[in-house]
Image: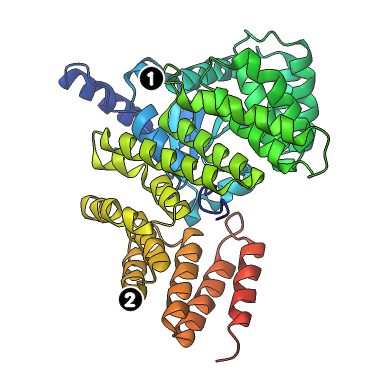
């Protein structure tokens, strides 16, 4: 049985002008909303404008390869329901792979993509952090809560928990959020956010027992909410992560899997496609933990069919390409990488400036043992804009594997050496010593030139 390594790959005046242009565009297009007016990759300008206008900054800390980031961009941030809040915030998108945004990472920890912050420009302090995708309704609720925090009207213990969480102090945030939930009304606007934030923090520190207990307690209360898919996905992750001899592990995992299956099959539950896809990934994890090869494949087939249908319904090439990452993962899990080639080629033709389609094609070709095609696709990906950050390491690593598969170990060594040099030269906030060390070990394993 394949592991889930693929499925788990697994958010100034210019701002005023952008907002005005967005509103003018609405008028010129019979009220059509063209999306939130994001400033791109200029934190200083966003903070300066926010201070002038006396409003908070909403930050989308994203990566161009992140499927959830793209899903939010295509399906949520373009929703007309967000039009009334355009003027209430300065909107800032930061591609965290770009070197100019590395300093932001050192100030505000981004531990997963996407991560969203609401920042008080008066102190440059994060009021709220949200990790992962969400629905339009959740964005609006989040903004309502952020407005209260900006005004100093958030309950004290919740404000403290939010501050700890925003600073990446997960252990301390866990204790504070638990205190909040002890007395919180499940109908309170902040209840769902508190649960999901606490689940992420527990996952990040590896507390499987605590995380599973929270999922078991909160899921009955939130079963009909859009966060149900995320909660049950966490629940399966925690249950599968328990020690094999843990009491009731099998029964608790089976119950989480049962509820995940109900949620995946419940068409009346209006989950965003990215969240429903995540539930299928969780179901794969449950079948893997059970050692069920046939059941694993059945879930992978259902996952692929769901993603193919979602991609077919997409209105634009950009929206369709949102699903490319998970579709590739699904077909890799099925051992059918050749089925990913047509839609990845389609995306490469439609989005010639995007490095993701050829980079993903190179992965598919590697598993098809089509070495030359994979090498060519990797070279196309590396030639595109946006491959100067951490993602370049993955592309180079895959290219080295293609060379090795072809039998050209010298080219593989050169490629890995380039990856080591690139990874070591990345700025603080983007540099990962563990990733560089892993590349060095891979280079050493190839032996001397």
Q: Which mark is residue 326?
A: none
In the rendered image, which residue does mark 2 sit on? 372
Location of residue 98 in the rendering, given as x and y in whole percent from the top left corner: 46, 54
* Residue that lies at the very extreme toward the front in this rendered image: 294
Q: Which mark is residue 82?
A: 1
Q: Are marks 2 and 1 in contact (CB under 8 Å)?
A: no
Q: Is residue 31 above or below residue 17?
A: above
Q: Is residue 350 above or below residue 159?
A: below
Location of residue 410 in the rendering, given as x and y in whole percent from the top left corner: 48, 87
Earlier in the chain: of badge 2 and badge 1, it is 1
Q: Quadrant of the N terminus?
A: bottom right
Nearer-the-camera pick, 48 or 275: 275
Q: Residue at x 43, y 74 (%)?
A: 402
> For the residues carrying marks 2 and 1, which lies nearer the camera in this image?
2
Q: Residue at x 76, y 41 (%)?
A: 242
Going by the image, does 222 lie left or right of 305?
A: right
Q: Residue at x 33, y 62 (%)?
A: 384
Q: Real-space Cα distance between discs 2 and 1?
A: 47 Å
- Crowding at dot 1, Cα within 10 Å, few <14 / some 14-19 / many 20+, comes out as some
Q: Quadrant of the C terminus?
A: bottom right
* Residue that lies at the very extreme toward the bottom in this rendered image: 449
Q: Is residue 292 above or below residue 159?
A: below
Location of residue 329 in the rendering, given as x and y in whole percent from the top left corner: 45, 50
Q: Residue at x 59, y 47 (%)?
A: 105
């Amino acid at each position: 049985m394949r592991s889930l390594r693929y499925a788990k790959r697994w958010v100034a005046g210019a701002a005023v002008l952008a907002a005005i242009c967005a509103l003018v565009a609405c008028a010129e297009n019979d009220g059509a909303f063209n999306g939130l007016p994001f400033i791109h990759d200029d934190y200083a300008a966003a903070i300066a404008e926010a201070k002038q206008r006396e409003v908070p900054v909403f930050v989308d800390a994203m990566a161009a390869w992140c499927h959830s980031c793209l899903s939010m961009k295509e399906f949520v941030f373009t929703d007309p329901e967000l039009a009334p809040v355009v003027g209430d915030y300065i909107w800032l998108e930061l591609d965290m792979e770009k070197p100019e945004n590395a300093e932001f990472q050192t100030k505000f920890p981004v531990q997963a993509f996407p991560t969203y912050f609401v920042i008080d420009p008066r102190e440059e302090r994060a009021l709220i952090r949200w990790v992962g995708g969400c629905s339009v309704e959740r964005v609006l609720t989040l903004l309502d809560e952020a407005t209260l925090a900006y005004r100093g009207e958030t309950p004290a213990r919740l404000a403290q928990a939010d501050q700890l969480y925003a600073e990446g102090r997960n252990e301390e945030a866990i204790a504070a959020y638990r205190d909040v939930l002890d007395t919180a009304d499940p109908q309170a606007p902040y209840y769902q956010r508190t649960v999901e934030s606490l689940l992420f923090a527990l996952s990040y520190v590896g507390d499987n027992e605590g995380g599973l207990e929270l999922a078991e307690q909160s899921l009955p209360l939130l079963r009909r909410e859009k966060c149900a898919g995320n909660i049950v996905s966490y629940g399966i992750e925690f249950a599968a992560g328990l020690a094999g001899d843990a009491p009731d592990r099998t029964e608790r995992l089976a119950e989480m899997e049962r509820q995940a299956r109900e949620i995946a099959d419940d068409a009346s539950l209006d989950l965003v496609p990215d969240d429903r896809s995540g539930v299928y990934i969780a179901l794969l994890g449950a079948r893997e933990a059970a050692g069920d090869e046939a059941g694993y494949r059945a879930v992978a087939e259902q996952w692929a069919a769901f993603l193919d249908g979602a991609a077919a319904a997409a209105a634009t090439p950009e929206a369709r390409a949102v699903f490319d990452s998970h579709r590739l993962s699904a077909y890799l899990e099925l051992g059918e990488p050749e089925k990913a080639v047509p839609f990845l080629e389609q995306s490469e033709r439609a989005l010639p400036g995007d490095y993701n389609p050829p980079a993903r094609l190179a992965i598919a070709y590697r598993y098809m043992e089509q070495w030359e095609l994979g090498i060519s696709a990797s070279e196309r990906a590396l030639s595109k804009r946006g491959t100067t950050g951490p993602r370049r390491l993955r592309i180079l690593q895959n290219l080295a594997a293609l060379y090795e598969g072809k039998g050209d170990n010298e080219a593989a060594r050169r490629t890995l050496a380039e990856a080591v040099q690139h990874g070591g030269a990345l700025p603080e906030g983007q540099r990962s010593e563990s990733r560089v060390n892993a590349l060095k070990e891979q280079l050493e394993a190839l032996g001397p030139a």
